[in-house]
Structure formats: C-alpha cells, structure tokens
Image: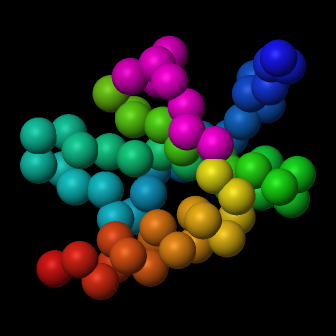
Amino acid sequence: MSTLDLSGSQWEKSSYSSTIEGECVEFARNLAPSGIVPVRDSKSPAGPVLLLSPAAWSDFVVFAANDN
C-alpha cells in the first residue's frame, strides 16, 4: 500500500458549499493534472480525504449544481 503526499495540495472551498451549518466541501484543483482530485470536509481538514478522478469530480459538480 502506498501513501499519497497531499502536503502540496492547494485547498479551495467549492462554490456549491453551503454556509448553513458549515457544510463545506474543499478540493485541491492543483492536483487534477496528476489524475486525482482530493476532496475533504473543511470542518475536518485533518480527517479523511476522498480521491476522485477529474471526470468523477466533474460529474459530482454537475450533480450538485442540479440538486435544487
């Protein structure tokens, strides 16, 4: 099992995040060229990170934008 070094991640808060009850998703767009988009809960920056492909992240963003 290998470990991914995320120390160079430049975390950005998603524009789709809600300010209600602190629902905030952050992602590291700068790692997308390497084939992954790390995603985390901004309330728990030391917590788990979900690793998505750029295509899966794009699909998630489209889904979130259409979820009214």
> Which residue is found at the position 38% from the left and 22% from the top?
44
Numbered range of the magenta stretch: 44-51
Q: Which residue is located at x 48 percent, y 37 percent?
A: 40
Dominant secondary structure, magenta: loop
Looking at this view, is 62 or 43 the one in front?
62
Whether residue 49 is in magenta: the answer is yes
Give the farthest residue toward the front.
Answer: 1
Q: Position of residue 53 (x, y in %)?
A: 70, 58
Q: Is 67 on the left or on the right of 31, as rendered?
A: left
Residue 43 included in the magenta stretch of the image: no
Q: In the image shown, does 12 or 32 lie closer to the viewer?
A: 32
Tell me the quadrant of the picture where the C terminus can be found: bottom left
Residue 65 in picture, x, y percent from top left: 34, 78
Q: Is residue 31 above or below residue 22?
A: below
Q: Number of numbered discs present?
A: 0
Task: Look at the image and tell me whether residue 30 can be seen.
Answer: no
Q: Is residue 51 visible?
A: yes
**On screen, 19 above or below 61?**
above
Residue 62 vs 36, above or below: the answer is: below
Residue at (31% x, 56% y) in the render: 17
Give the quarter of the figure containing the N terminus.
top right
Image location (x, y in percent) of residue 36: 75, 50
Name the residue: 77% across, 57% down.
32
| 65 in relation to 15, above or below | below
